């Protein structure tokens, strides 16, 4: 019985810091919340999980072009975490395609996917102008309107 009590006490002590770090912010979101781009590539990935990013004011089923425009506006306003989220959501919309199962692991050859990836990488590297240029290219891409 004494072993169980010691084990329970150690378990409680070990769990206390983890529980303290999982509190919810007042707006009901989950932590950690980040307003800057992160976990885009190996150079800026410091944790096993990506921080929560602000959600752009775009319907989840909107065309990729609306997410691109939201990313452009977010960069112009200095909301870089929101811009990253908008770019990632645009990529997800573009990659929502049908492929035969044997080719599911192959990267998409779509030019819009490359443009969005370039914008995301430029944003992660702190190059807002390059990100905006890639987003302008993506917005002009006919694939973005679907």
Image (cartoon, rainbow, N blue to C red):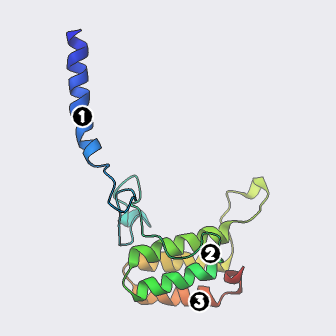
Kind of element beneath mark 2:
helix
Residue at (35, 57) in percent of width and height: 31
Residue at (66, 67) in percent of width and height: 95
Distance in Å between CA atoms under marks 2 and 1? 44 Å
Q: Which residue is mark 1?
A: 14
Q: Which residue is mark 3?
A: 137
Kind of element beneath mark 3:
helix
Dot placed on the residue nearer the N-terminal end, 2 or 3: 2
Labelled pair 2, 3 in contact (Cβ < 8 Å): no
Which quarter of the picture shows residue 117? bottom right
Q: Position of residue 42 (x, y in %)?
A: 41, 63
Q: Nearer the viewer, residue 125 or 55?
A: 55
Q: Nearer the viewer, residue 23 or 113?
A: 23
Dot placed on the residue nearer the N-terminal end, 2 or 1: 1
Question: In the rendered image, which quarter contains the N terminus?
Answer: top left
Q: Position of residue 120 (x, y in %)?
A: 48, 75
Of circles 2 and 1, the one toward us is 1
Residue at (64, 91) in percent of width and height: 140
Q: Is residue 58 left or right of residue 78?
A: right
Q: Position of residue 64 (x, y in %)?
A: 63, 77
Q: Nearer the viewer, residue 41 or 123?
A: 123
Q: Is residue 1 left or right of residue 59?
A: left
Q: Is residue 95 left or right of residue 34?
A: right
Q: Position of residue 94 (x, y in %)?
A: 66, 72
Distance in Å between CA atoms under marks 1 and 3? 50 Å
Kind of element beneath mark 1:
helix
Q: Which residue is mark 2?
A: 113
Outermost residue toward the right in this view: 100
């Amino acid at each position: 019985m004494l072993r169980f009590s010691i084990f329970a006490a150690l378990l409680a002590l070990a769990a206390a810091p983890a529980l303290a770090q999982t509190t919810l912010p007042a707006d009901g979101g989950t932590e950690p919340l980040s307003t800057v781009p992160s976990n885009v590539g190996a150079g800026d990935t410091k944790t096993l999980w990506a921080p929560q990013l602000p959600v752009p004011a775009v319907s989840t089923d909107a065309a990729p072009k609306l997410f691109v425009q939201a990313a452009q506006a977010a960069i112009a306003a200095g909301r870089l975490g929101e811009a990253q989220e908008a770019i990632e959501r645009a990529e997800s919309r573009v990659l929502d395609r049908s492929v035969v199962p044997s080719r599911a692991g192959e990267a998409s050859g779509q030019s819009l996917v490359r443009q969005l990836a370039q914008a995301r990488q430029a944003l992660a590297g702190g190059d807002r102008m390059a990100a905006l240029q890639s987003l302008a290219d993506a917005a002009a891409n006919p694939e973005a309107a679907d």
